Amino acid sequence: MNLASRKEDMKLKNKIIAIAAVGAMALTTSCSDTLDVSSPSQMDQTMVFSSTEFATNAINGVYILFCEDPYTSRMCGVWMQNTDVEAEVPSAGVPASDRRAVWSLQGPAITGFNDVYNAWNNNLQAIERANQVRAGVDNSAIGSQAEMQQIKGEATCLKAFRYYLMCGLWGDVPYYDEAAKWGDVIDKPRTDKNVIYSRCLQQLVDIEPSMKWSDVNTGGIERMNRDFAIGLIARLALFRAGYGLTADGTMKRADDYLDVNADSLTVTYTNLSGTEVTARTHNDYVQMAKDYCQKIIQLKNRDLNPDFYTAFENEMNYTVVNNSEVLAEVAFVQNYGGDIGWSYGVPNTDGCTNGSTTIQVGLTPSYYMSFADNDYRREITCANYSHRADTVAAAAANGIKVGKWDRALAAKALGKDSSKGTGINFPLMRWSDILLMLAEAENELNGPTALAKDCLTKVRARAFRNSPTFDADVTNYVSALNSKEAFFNAIVNERAWEFGGEGLRKFDLVRWNLYAQKIEEAMRTMLVWGINHYYADIEKDEAALAQVLRDYPELPQYASWANKLWYAKQANNNLRTDIKWYNTKYKVEYDDATMTADGWASVNWGSALIKRTRTYSYKGVDYGTTGSKTEDKAAGTVTYALGTAPNNVEFTITKGDPSGVTRTDVYQASDYATRLYRGYSNGALKGNGVVPYILPIGITTLNASEVLNNDGYCFSSTQMGEGINVNVATIVTENW
């Protein structure tokens, strides 16, 4: 059976399982309200876990929760914004109780948002079901069998991954170490996220050796496997070593405020030399991440796909390849969950043959521009186009979406009326993550050694494999990273370029404590890039120019960046290659009139990131943004028309006489640039250094609890307004 056939068979099997799992939920605790579990399973677990078939049904009850809206739409990607990479601009107005408040980092607006309540429950329900499976295997007469241990390992991975999501989105959350039993107190307060990471790590460490590799496990990478378990240990170890927002509103590592020698914060594992060690401190957990990255390389090494697009192309083709680049992916089923190619991917609108989208995940213009000229990943990751009625249209800088998944290219005919439930899988971890985590950990411990540089080189070598300047882009680039700080910054950048649109950036920025810095850098980059669009106007006013150069001394660095991208349609095959781009990053040498006359069309690029508001006044009266003057050369007069009826005036003067008209030009950050991070800054570049990224606990959950609250975590300091556009310069022209 070929890979595609295997995929179709697995998808059909998973669909049957998914439908059957609704009835199989009696195998696990009823969690319609996670804080009001009336009783554990009414079925005898001895029977449920008396065979691998029954046990598989139980673990399927955990997987099925991936196919519900809280994960498929929200936690998979829509809520993994706003960062310097992924960002979707909210609409105008004070945020309502909907997803816009998540995009704009304005959590207090969504305490009553039902999606928050549903996502919270979806995670805790998955965690409880995973705990039930773990307990069922432990108490089973056949629990020691290899297949049962694999099922326990899958449950352990699913539990750890769900806590990874919860701690990233809500920070400190209730921790449930074991399955609920009759009489247990399940209304629990928040547990420090570092305790949760440590406990999940210990459970993973204990079960990982008993798990199966993806190429021998039933379901391969569409189910939890040993490949992913080892990678997840490395990832969680870095999070345990990293920063997080604490209740007092500051970013701290565990070492900064907890007793890291406490049993709840330690993890014991066997290192590569066979010695049992215990991780306690920041460095210990970084070492643990390094050890587990090296462990999978030693036990199950592989190469990156030669082509960066292959992993995503496989998902678009509904093809599963085990023991390759993707270590694990969510197995979405067509018509039953899965928003890849719906809320996530390239826009398809106005009646496309393969259905429609409502794209809610974007990429920032500054991210697009950050790629080196010959980095192939930009072409794959950043879709500066969309599909409209089965034809390709160019997108402006503030309309870049994730190009890794495009329902127009899906191997299945999804249908003109289709929308959600594309069945396109989503990667949870790729091999390049292992390489970059190893490079990061090695650098943190020992600086930019040969090992660290080799891992980074492998990732960049693929990205620039066809570059005419390969040596400069890869060999010389990596060789020049000779300090710990320089190499770390390179890793921060490389993870952005490698994983853009895959929902990793937000949590990475948190653990590095770089969230505020990076969104401020993105905002400033967009602002300065936009200023160049109006530079010719600003430089005419000496005072305004002096102010701009004083406030933004880096302005000349962006002088060559394009205000517009020019393109021409060269085919009508509904492919991105139908668009021929004259320029993709830098300004052109010809003026707009010449380009247009030569048959090129344009989309706003840097010009979309700054706005000019021009107003007029006359004899002390404000006439708003409408104003014109017309010269009659024969008569030697100038006629002015200001304002709109009924607040308007028209008059004529002799040319050269004072007009009494004052024209005021205010240059500001555009609304797009302002709204992206308004909850952090209340105006670009005005933040306090701590990003309020944590979601609130929903009001329904709080009302059902006696111990949970939303106290702290920067909620009180979050700005709830529309945002304030940054003023760049004001030019006043008297007697215009």
Image (cartoon, rainbow, N blue to C red):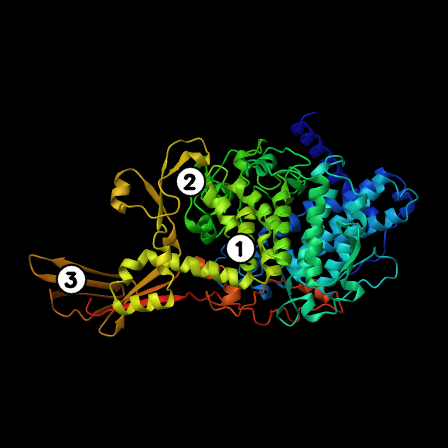
The residues bearing labels 1 and 2 have C-alpha atoms spaced at a distance of: 44 Å
Mark 2 touching mark 3, by CB under 8 A? no
Q: Which residue is mark 2?
A: 393
Q: Residue 82: x, y in percent?
A: 54, 57
- Tell me where residue 578 sits by quadrant: top left
Residue 39 percent coordinates (x, y): 85, 56
Q: Are marks 1 and 3 in contact (CB under 8 Å)?
A: no
Extreme bottom residue here? 620
Picture residue at 47% right of the left edge, 45% below the top: 473
Mark 1 or mark 3: name the one nearer the start of the chain: 1
Kindly identify which residue carries mark 3.
639
Question: In the image shown, does 299 or 687 lie closer to the viewer?
Answer: 299
Numbered disc 2: secondary structure: strand
- Where's residue 100, x and y in %? 54, 57
Residue 136 is marked as: none
Mark in front: 1 vs 2: 1
Residue type, numbered disc 1: Asn
- At label 2, which amino acid type do we have? Ala
Which image quarter holds the C terminus?
A: bottom left
**Residue 173 in view (yes/no):** no
Q: Which mark is residue 482?
A: 1
Q: Going from the N terminus, do you reach mark 1 or mark 2 first?
A: 2
Q: Amino acid at mark 3?
A: Thr
Q: Secondary structure at mark 3?
A: strand
**481 up-or-down from 266: above or below:** above
What secondary structure is marked by label 1? loop
